[in-house]
C-alpha cells in the first residue's frame, strides 16, 4: 500500500478540513479567468509578457552543481521571472483558512514558495508565473471564501474585526464587496483601481463557512472538543520541552 | 460579583459614542456582536485627530513646508473607515484616545522612561562595613543623616571636596534626590524623615509586610539622578554619575583621605557590589548598556508600575 501521510490528528470537522488543506485536496468552488486573476494580483498588465530579472536558466550556463542537477527548476525560475507576492487576510469568524494553514498548504503542495505567516494574514512569494498558477488554485477553491477572506497587499485589517452588516469581512479600501449576491473586486491587491469588475462568485453562507472552516472557535467547533488533537499538541509540547534533555547522559 | 473591568473597558470602547464615532448610537454595538455597521466617518469622528489636523495645517502654513495632514493617508482615504475607538487605561477609569498613548504625546510615558533610566538602588551596608571594619570609623544615625544631607547636595552635580569646580544650576536639577529605605523600624526612626521612604506609608499593608520582610535589616539608597543628565547620557551613565557623587560624599562626610585604598572599596561597592540597576543590558545588536527600559524584565516592570499600590 502506498504511503499516505496523515498531516494532522483529530476527528472534528475542523481537524478534517485542516488535513484537506495540507493535503491540497481542495474542492473547486468557482471559476476566475487568467486575465481577471492577473488584474487583481496587480503585478503586470493582463496579456503582457512576464517581465524577468535574469535570462532563462538554459541560456545562462549554470555552474556545475549536483543540487542543481537534482532539483528541476520551477517554470518561473527557468524563465527568470520576478519574485512576486500574493497575500490573504482571513476573518476569524470562520474563514476557511487559518493563516498557518495557508502556509502549510503552500509549503507542502507547491515548489519554490516562500510563505510568510502572520497573526491575521499570510503572504506567499514565488516566481511570477508560478505565483499565478498557485493563486489560481487558492482563489478558485474552498481555501478561500471571498466573503470572509480578502486578497490584500496592504491595509490588511479585517481578520479580527467584526463583520460588516452583510456578513462579509471589513476592508478599509473596499477592494471587494458584495453586489447582487456575488463578491466583486474592482481594485488590485494594494487598492489601485483596475479596469474591470472581477466576479469572485458567491460568498459562503454562515453555515457553510462554519462547516468548511479550519478555525477552532468556542461557538463552533472548540479546540478542546477534539481529544486526539489535544493529546497530540500536548505530546509535541512535551517533546519540545524535553528535547535534548538527557539527565543520565 | 462585579462585572470584570475588562468587560467594562470593552463596553466603553465598543458600545459608547466617543467623539462623533456613533459607536453606541447609529452603530448600536454590543460587545458580543459579530457584525457591525461600518460608517466610514473618516478622521473627523475623532476630536484629537481634528485638533492634530488643524495644528498640522498651521505648521505647514507657518514654515512653508508640508506637515501633518490626515488627508495624505493612503492617497486620500483617511483613517477612520471603521470607528476610531478609545482605550481604557488598565486599573483606572481613565478613557483616552489612542493618540494620547503614543509616547511622543504622553508626558507620563516619558516620565516613566526617564524615571527608569535615572534611577538606581545602592546598598549602604557594604559601605558601612568598609568604614567600620577597615577604617575604624564610627557609623551612627547622626553620621548617616549628615551623609544623606551632603549627598542630596552633591547628587545633582555639586562639588563637595574639590575646589574651583563647575557645578549644575540647582533649578535645572531639582528633580534629583536620594532617599533611603529599610525593613528595620528602629533604624528608620532615627533617620531624618526628609530622607526616608517609609514603606508602611507607601504601600497597602499586605504589600508593605512582604517588602519589609524581604528587605529585612538591610538599608538601601534610592537614587534618582537629574533627568537632564540621563537625557544627555544613557542608562549606564546613571550608576556612574551616582557612584562618583556617593564616593565624594563618603570622603567628605566621613573625613577620609581622597586617595586611600578604602575609597576604591567604596567605589566598587557603589558601582558594582551594592548596585541594583533597573534594567539589564539589552542584546548587543541594539547597542544599549544596562539601566535602559528595554533591559527591564516584564516581571520587574510589573513591580514598577504603581497601579496595584495606588489602587489596590
Image (cartoon, coloured by chain):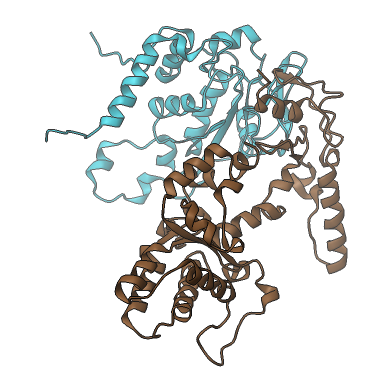
Chain colours: A cyan, B brown
Is there any visible trace of residue B46 in the rendered image? yes
In terms of depth relative to the viewer, which is nearer, A197 or B22? Answer: B22
Q: Is residue B271 above or below residue B76?
A: below
Q: Nearer the viewer, residue B118 or B135?
A: B135
Q: How many marks?
A: 0
Instruction: Look at 76% across and 35% down and name the residue there.
Output: B85
Q: Quick check: A210 left or right of B183?
A: right
- Classify B273 as above or below A212: below
Which image quarter: residue A31?
Answer: top right
Using the image, determine if residue B147 lies above or below residue A92: below
Residue positioned most to the left: A249
Relative image position of residue A48 (x, y in whole percent)? 60, 39
The x and y percentages for residue B157 are 57, 77
Decide if residue B76 is on the left or right side of residue A71.
right
Residue sitting farthest toward the bottom: B164
Identify which residue is drawn at 62% across, 66% down. Answer: B227
Residue A100, percent from left and from top? 47, 27
Q: Residue at 25% of width from left, 40% of height from top? A: A69
For this rendering, which residue is in front, A227 or A65? A227
Q: Quadrant of the C terminus of chain B?
A: top right
Residue occupying image coordinates x 65% and y 56% = B110
- The picture quadrant where one finds residue B167 is bottom right
Q: Quadrant of the N terminus of chain B?
A: top right
The answer, for residue A43, to whether it is visible in the render is no
Of residue B27 and residue A24, the one placed in the foreground of this image is B27
Amino acid at each position: 500500500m502506498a504511503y499516505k501521510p496523515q498531516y494532522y490528528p483529530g476527528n472534528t470537522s475542523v481537524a478534517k478540513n485542516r488535513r484537506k488543506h495540507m493535503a491540497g485536496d481542495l474542492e473547486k468552488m468557482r471559476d476566475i479567468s487568467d486575465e481577471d486573476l492577473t488584474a487583481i494580483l496587480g503585478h503586470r498588465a493582463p496579456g503582457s509578457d512576464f517581465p524577468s530579472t535574469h535570462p532563462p536558466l538554459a541560456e545562462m550556463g549554470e555552474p556545475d552543481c549536483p543540487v542543481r542537477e537534482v532539483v528541476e527548476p520551477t517554470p518561473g525560475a527557468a524563465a527568470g521571472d520576478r519574485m512576486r507576492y500574493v497575500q490573504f487576510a482571513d476573518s476569524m469568524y470562520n474563514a476557511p483558512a487559518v493563516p498557518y494553514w495557508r502556509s502549510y498548504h503552500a509549503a507542502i503542495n507547491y515548489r519554490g514558495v516562500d510563505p510568510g505567516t502572520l497573526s491575521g494574514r499570510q503572504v506567499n512569494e514565488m516566481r511570477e508565473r508560478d505565483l499565478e498558477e498557485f493563486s489560481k488554485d487558492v482563489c478558485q477553491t474552498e481555501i478561500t471564501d471571498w466573503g470572509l477572506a480578502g486578497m490584500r497587499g496592504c491595509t490588511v485589517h479585517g481578520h479580527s474585526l467584526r463583520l460588516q452588516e452583510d456578513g462579509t469581512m471589513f476592508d478599509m479600501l473596499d477592494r471587494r464587496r458584495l453586489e447582487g449576491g456575488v463578491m466583486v473586486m474592482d481594485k488590485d491587491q494594494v487598492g489601485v483601481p483596475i479596469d474591470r469588475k472581477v466576479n469572485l462568485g458567491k460568498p459562503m453562507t454562515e453555515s457553510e463557512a462554519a462547516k468548511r472552516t479550519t478555525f477552532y472557535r468556542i461557538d463552533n467547533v472548540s479546540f478542546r472538543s477534539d481529544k486526539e488533537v489535544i493529546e497530540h499538541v500536548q505530546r509535541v509540547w512535551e517533546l519540545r520541552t524535553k528535547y535534548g534533555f538527557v539527565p543520565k547522559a | 460579583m462585579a462585572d470584570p473591568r475588562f468587560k467594562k473597558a470593552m463596553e466603553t470602547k465598543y458600545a459608547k459614542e466617543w467623539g462623533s464615532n456613533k459607536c453606541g448610537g447609529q452603530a448600536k454595538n454590543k460587545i458580543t456582536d459579530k457584525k457591525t455597521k461600518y460608517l466610514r466617518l473618516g478622521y473627523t469622528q475623532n476630536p484629537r485627530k481634528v485638533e492634530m489636523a488643524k495644528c498640522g495645517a498651521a505648521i505647514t502654513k507657518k514654515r512653508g513646508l508640508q506637515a501633518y495632514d490626515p488627508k495624505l493617508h493612503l492617497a486620500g482615504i483617511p483613517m477612520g473607515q471603521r470607528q476610531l475607538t478609545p482605550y481604557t487605561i488598565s486599573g483606572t477609569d481613565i478613557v483616552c484616545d489612542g493618540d494620547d498613548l503614543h509616547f511622543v504625546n504622553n508626558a507620563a510615558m516619558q516620565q516613566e522612561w526617564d524615571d527608569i533610566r535615572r534611577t538606581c538602588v545602592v546598598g549602604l551596608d557594604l559601605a558601612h562595613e568598609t568604614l567600620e571594619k577597615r577604617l575604624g570609623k564610627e557609623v551612627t544615625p547622626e553620621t548617616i543623616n549628615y551623609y544623606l544631607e551632603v549627598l542630596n547636595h552633591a547628587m545633582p552635580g555639586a562639588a563637595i571636596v574639590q575646589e574651583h569646580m563647575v557645578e549644575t544650576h540647582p533649578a535645572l536639577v531639582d528633580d534629583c534626590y536620594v532617599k533611603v529605605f529599610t525593613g528595620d523600624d528602629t533604624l528608620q526612626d532615627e533617620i531624618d524623615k526628609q530622607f526616608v521612604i517609609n514603606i508602611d506609608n507607601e504601600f497597602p499593608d499586605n504589600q508593605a509586610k512582604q517588602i519589609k520582610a524581604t528587605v529585612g535589616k538591610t538599608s538601601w539608597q534610592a537614587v534618582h539622578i537629574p533627568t537632564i543628565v540621563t537625557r544627555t547620557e544613557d542608562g549606564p551613565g546613571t550608576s556612574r554619575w551616582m557612584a562618583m557623587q556617593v564616593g565624594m560624599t563618603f570622603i567628605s562626610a566621613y573625613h577620609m583621605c581622597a586617595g586611600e585604598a578604602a575609597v576604591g572599596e567604596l567605589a566598587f561597592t557603589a558601582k558594582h557590589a551594592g548596585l541594583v540597576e533597573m534594567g539589564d543590558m539589552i542584546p548587543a545588536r541594539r547597542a544599549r548598556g544596562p539601566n535602559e527600559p528595554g533591559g527591564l524584565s516584564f516581571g520587574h516592570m510589573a513591580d514598577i508600575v504603581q497601579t496595584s499600590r495606588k489602587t489596590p
